[in-house]
Image (tube, rainbow, N blue to C red):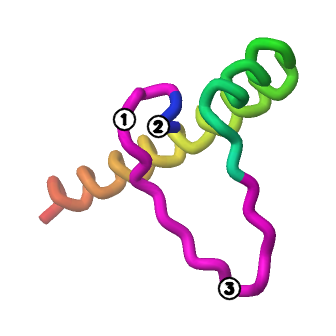
Amino acid sequence: MAVFTRENRSARVIASEPCTVMLIPKQQFLGLMQSNPRIAHSLIESMAKRIDLLNKEVTQLRQKQLDQ
């Protein structure tokens, strides 16, 4: 998401088994999004689902605080 917010990357991962990682340079990634609407739509859909899940988690945590 940092490519859209213009901030430094903040995510870190540790693989639980051997894997292959692919680095896509920022400009190449943005070009791919512009030239392939299906990929852009899929990414937006995935991000929207994550935002919705986070909103629900924040709401639940806030409700727990109010209930105490």
Q: Quick one: SS at disc 3?
A: loop
Residue that carries the numbered disc 1 in the rendered image: 7
The prevailing secondary structure element of the residues shown in magenta is: loop
- The front one of 19 and 46 is 19
The residue depicted at 71 percent of the width and 33 percent of the height is 43
Outermost residue toward the bottom in this view: 17
| Residue 10 on the magenta segment | yes
Residue 22 drawn at (x, y percent): 75, 55
How crowded pointer 1 is (Cα within 10 Å; few <14, some 14-19, many 20+) is rated as few
Q: Quick one: SS at disc 2?
A: helix
Please, is residue 43 above or below residue 36 in the view? below
Residue 46 drawn at (x, y percent): 68, 38
State the mark number for residue 2.
Answer: 2
Q: Find the distance from the CA under tag 3 to the CA under tag 2.
A: 24 Å
Please give the range of residues in magenta.
4-22
Which one is earlier in the sequence, the residue at label 3 or at label 2? 2
Please, is residue 23 above or below residue 33 in the view? below
The residue depicted at 72 percent of the width and 28 percent of the height is 28
Q: Nearer the viewer, mark 3 or mark 1?
A: 1
Asked where in the image residue 14 lies, by quadrant, the reply is bottom right
Horizontal side, residue 9 vs residue 52: left or right = left
Count every numbered label the image shows and give the total. Answer: 3
- The front one of 57 and 12 is 12
Q: Find the distance from the CA under tag 2 to the CA under tag 1.
A: 5 Å
